[in-house]
Amino acid sequence: IPADGAADEKRGRQALHTMRQAFSVLLRLLVILGLLFACFGPAYAHLLLRLLYGTTWSETSAPGVLSWYCTYILAMAVNGLCEAFVQGVATQEQLRTYNYWMVLFSATFIGAVV
């Protein structure tokens, strides 16, 4: 019979393994779906706008913007999944450090824009 510490450590390793597997499966699914949008979205953006809104929007810069947005969705989705995973598995100290760096980089970005 293992001691309580050894059993807790084994459960912790098993839980970490399960979380890694779930993250891996979700990331793969997300990348496949995102690549689907990135591959076919730009090619069909003009057609979609023309069918839905006519020449009002299809003859403007909207198809180009929608094309880039279809590609940008993949980057936003991967970022969101990674941030959610970090928020879910990090300790309180790691989250505090993470939030400190996020505030610092956000302030730097705002300063660079202004």
Image (cartoon, rainbow, N blue to C red):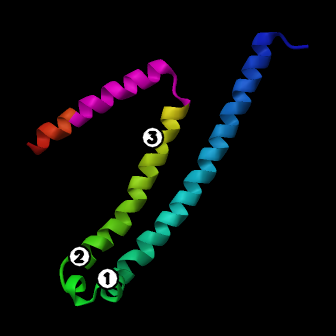
- Position of residue 49 relative to residue 17, above or below, is below
From the image, state whether disc 3 or disc 2 is nearer to you.
Answer: 2
Packing grade of label 3 (10 A; few <14, some 14-19, many >=20) is few
- Mark 2 touches mark 1? (CB < 8 Å): yes
- Residue at image x 59%, y 52%? 26
x then y, percent, for residue 95: 43, 25
Q: Quadrant of residue 112?
A: top left
Report the residue marked by disc 2: 62
Say which residue label 3 marks: 83
SS at mark 3? helix
Q: Residue at position x 37%, y 82% from top?
A: 43
Task: List x then y, in percent, for residue 109.
Answer: 19, 40
Say which of 16 and 66 sits in front: 66
- What kind of element bears circle 2? helix
Asked if residue 59 lies left or right of residue 49, the reply is: left
Residue 72 rendering spot, x and y as whole percentages: 35, 61
Which quadrant of the view contains residue 6? top right
Q: Is residue 16 above or below residue 51?
A: above
Q: CA distance from mark 2 to mark 1?
A: 8 Å
- Please tell me which residue lies in front, 57 or 65: 57
Earlier in the chain: of badge 3 and badge 2, it is 2
- Extent of the magenta region: 89-106
Residues at marks 3 and 1, CA–CA distance in whole angstroms: 33 Å
> Sequence order check: which comes first, mark 2 or mark 1?
1
The type of residue carrying mark 3 is Glu
Residue type of the residue flagged with mark 1: Leu
Classed neighbour count for the residue bearing mark 2: other residues with Cα under 10 Å, few (<14), some (14–19), many (≥20): some
Q: For the residues marked 3 and 2, what is the alpha-carbon distance in whole angstroms?
A: 30 Å
Marks 3/2 in contact by CB < 8 Å: the verdict is no
* Residue position for label 1: 49
Callout 1: SS: helix
Kind of residue sitting beneath label 2: Ala
